[in-house]
Amino acid sequence: MSWKKLTDFPDSKVIKPSYDSTITYWKVENGKIWHQWKKLMKADIESFEVYESNDFIARDKNFVYHAWTKLAKVDRDTFEEVGDSYWKDKNYAYLEYETSIKPLKGLDSASFKYLKNGYAFDKSFAYFCGKVIKNCNHPTTLRVIPENKNFARDDENIFYESAVLKNADLKTWKLLENAFSRDEKSIYFTARKLPRVDIDTWQHIYRIFSKDKNRVYCMEQIQEDKSPDDWNKQKVIAHYKE
């Protein structure tokens, strides 16, 4: 997307619909720039631009702003959108989250690489939605798994978002349906291991339900009141209708 001067908008206002009303995100009023109900005291009107795909990011000839907050440490001329709320300038990579935009822990723009679906890394850390993936010891080897982009892997571990699938064997691990996966010893739902599962008889039933010869599972939780002998897809569908 691109930057556009605030004074080029009709009435020098950025107004967008919200539910059954509208919100004025940016405006020029009484010789000052405003974001919603707050005034930016020293923003330069003549050079002030808003980022068209983001209602909170703007800049003037000197600074970048997030809503009414001046981002004095952000380099105005190299600041750019990367994806999934990640931004960067010549010095740092950042994450925009709700009412703030803050540098990532690695403090390094040169080695920062955005992957997709919230995943990124730099030479020091791997990230999911800006959160450091603690068990990723080799961040530059992180790769998103194409079949389900909520999963990623490095040269040691499998991850679901920022959580590691504990003790998953990379050689035998494979993705299944509906966020289930398995290796030669375990079944996982997202990053959580199904307890006491008989892996040889385990099967996915429908959506988040599965079973083995002994138990029925909802996600990774054992369903003590359900029998694997008669719990099938039709029962799951009926369960959802209830």
Image: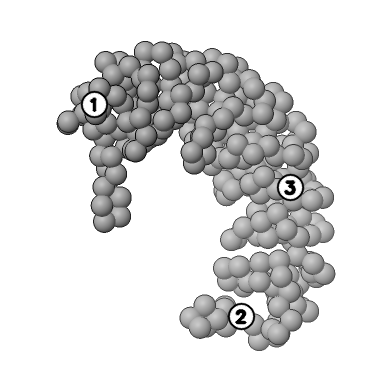
Badge 1 is on which residue? 30
Residue drawn at x 71%, y 70% is: 221
Badge 3 is on which residue? 164
Q: Is residue 34 left or right of residue 214?
A: left
CB within 8 Å, label 3 to label 1: no
- Please rate how many residues cluster around mark 2, counting C-alpha atoms within 10 Å: few if below 14, some from 14 to 19, many from 20: some
As measured in the structure, the alpha-carbon distance from the residue carrying label 3 to the one carrying label 1 is 53 Å
Q: Secondary structure at mark 2?
A: loop
- Residue type for callout 1: Asn
As measured in the structure, the alpha-carbon distance from the residue carrying label 2 to the one carrying label 1 is 67 Å
Q: Nearer the viewer, residue 12 or 177?
A: 12
In front of the other: label 2 or label 3?
Answer: 3
Residue drawn at x 27%, y 31% is: 27
Q: Position of residue 115 (x, y in %)?
A: 56, 34
Residue drawn at x 60%, y 36% is: 130
Badge 2 is on which residue? 232
